[in-house]
Image: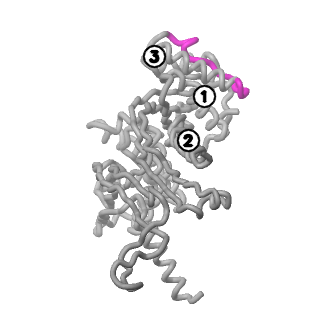
Amino acid sequence: MKSRIIQAASVAIISFGLLASCAGTKLVAQWKDDAYQGHPAKIFVIGQSKEYGPRTLVEDEFVRQLKARGNDAIASYTVLPREEKPEKETVLKKVQEVGADVIIVVKFLKKEMGGTHTPLRRYAVPQGFDTSWDSYYGGVSTDVGVRDVSYDYDEITMETTLFQTATRKPIWSALSQTTYQSGGPMKQIKPFTTAIVKNLAQERLVR
Amino acid sequence: MNRGVLVTILFCVLLVCIGCAATQVKQVRIDENYQGGQPKNVLVIAVVRQPTTRRMMESEFAKQFKKRGIGAVESFQALTTDTLVGDAARDGIVAVVKERGIDAVLMVRSAGSRVEERDIPGMTITTGVGMPYASSGAWGGYTTVMASFPEPSAPTTQGYSTEQKFLSLETQLYDVRTEKLIWSALSETRISGSPQEEINAFVSLMSRELFRAKLFR
């Protein structure tokens, strides 16, 4: 009985570890202009999306999280026309009007499906020389291992870029991959935003 | 420790490190007749569609040049990614070259990719404890080792196949005055995770190769 519990727990921990290591948002590439030393006074958030709904969700979440950390931010959809991609000059004019010195552009690049398969591995330890002194006398088998694990997942690739309004030059950009198994892409907006904002704070680009 | 032994160990470690490096230089070509003098201000262009990757690569090359006292300009500061493609690309580069006083252009671009498929067979490693089974003769007939514990008697793995991606990159240095290629290197990088993870090591290796050519002295 005891050995079965150990076995089940081992399989559960390893499987959880495999799943957890693949879920969430990771920044696969990051660039920063080392010459930039400023702190944004107001951030203009642009979510580049073909659909208006997801755009507003992304922008709202960024504004919420940035404000929660003590930054001033504004969502572009509140001041720009409801178009997929307004003209560059129209955007810049609006950015200057609202007094934003930094623009953050969140761009959806692609969504892919992936699969992972971890083949079966079994390990057995000879009786009497395994986990503890108790099992030496108990005579239990410690047949532990990794079960055949396979699962499918979706992966969204995004690019987030920070531009300085005055110079119109990029000051930071990152390529991120968000992996998830269930719940749909909309549910990934919050954890994705958290990962990006946290990284911006680590880089001392926002509070 | 004996000095000879220490040197041998260090040499072996170095060999292992070189063997494991993700990027391998396949070919280096130098214009032996180049008499243009040492470049002082280099425009770095990474022809990569993905902007963050392009910025990372260009900034890393620029750092390597600046570290050695050579001026460097990242092309993304002046040229957008779409202007690097097509016939208009040359005009855009020429304009930046004139504007910024560039005397050499370093260009990195893709030279193709390949995928290598490997089949890893399943394995059962039989080891055992217990008494040797002597079928013919006494202790000399040590023919089989019997395990004394119940099944599964040994570590077992299933067979599987893996795909390994390789990306070839061509790094070229042009002299602005003569518009001639003065140095080029063809390399291949093994991609294990995201390709961007290999950028720093790739740039470091290419810079070593480039400065070894003594074009900048």
Give the residue number, with chain letter if any, for mark 2.
A12
Closer to the camera: disc 2 or disc 1? 2
Q: Where is the N terminus of chain A found, in terms of image quarters?
A: top right
Circle on res. A102: 1
- Toward the right, the furthest residue is A70
Q: Earlier in the sequence, mark 2 or mark 1?
A: 2
Q: Which residue occupies the foreground of this view, A21 or B145?
A: B145
Identity, as a three-letter code, of the amino acid under mark 2: Ala
Q: Separation of disc 3 and disc 2 at Cα?
A: 50 Å
Residue drawn 58% across the image and 33% down it: A196
**Which image quarter: residue A34?**
top right
Q: Separation of disc 3 and disc 1 at Cα?
A: 18 Å
Identity, as a three-letter code, of the amino acid under mark 1: Val
**Where B141 falls versus B21 (above or below)?**
below
Magenta range: A68-81
Q: Which of marks 3 and 2 is nearer the N terminus?
A: 2
Q: Are marks 2 and 1 on the same chain?
A: yes
Q: Are marks 3 and 1 on the same chain?
A: yes
Closer to the camera: disc 3 or disc 2? 2
Q: Is residue A69 magenta?
A: yes
Local secondary structure at mark 2: helix
Residue A106, how many percent across, how many down? 51, 27
**Where B43 falls versus B184 (above or below)?**
above
Give the residue number, with chain letter if any, for mark 3.
A86
Whether residue A32 can be seen here: no
Whether residue A55 can be seen here: yes
Local secondary structure at mark 1: strand
**Mark count:** 3
Of all chains, the one bearing label 2 is: A
Of all chains, the one bearing label 3 is: A
Residue drawn 39% across the image and 59% down it: B23
Q: Which of marks 3 and 1 is nearer the N terminus?
A: 3
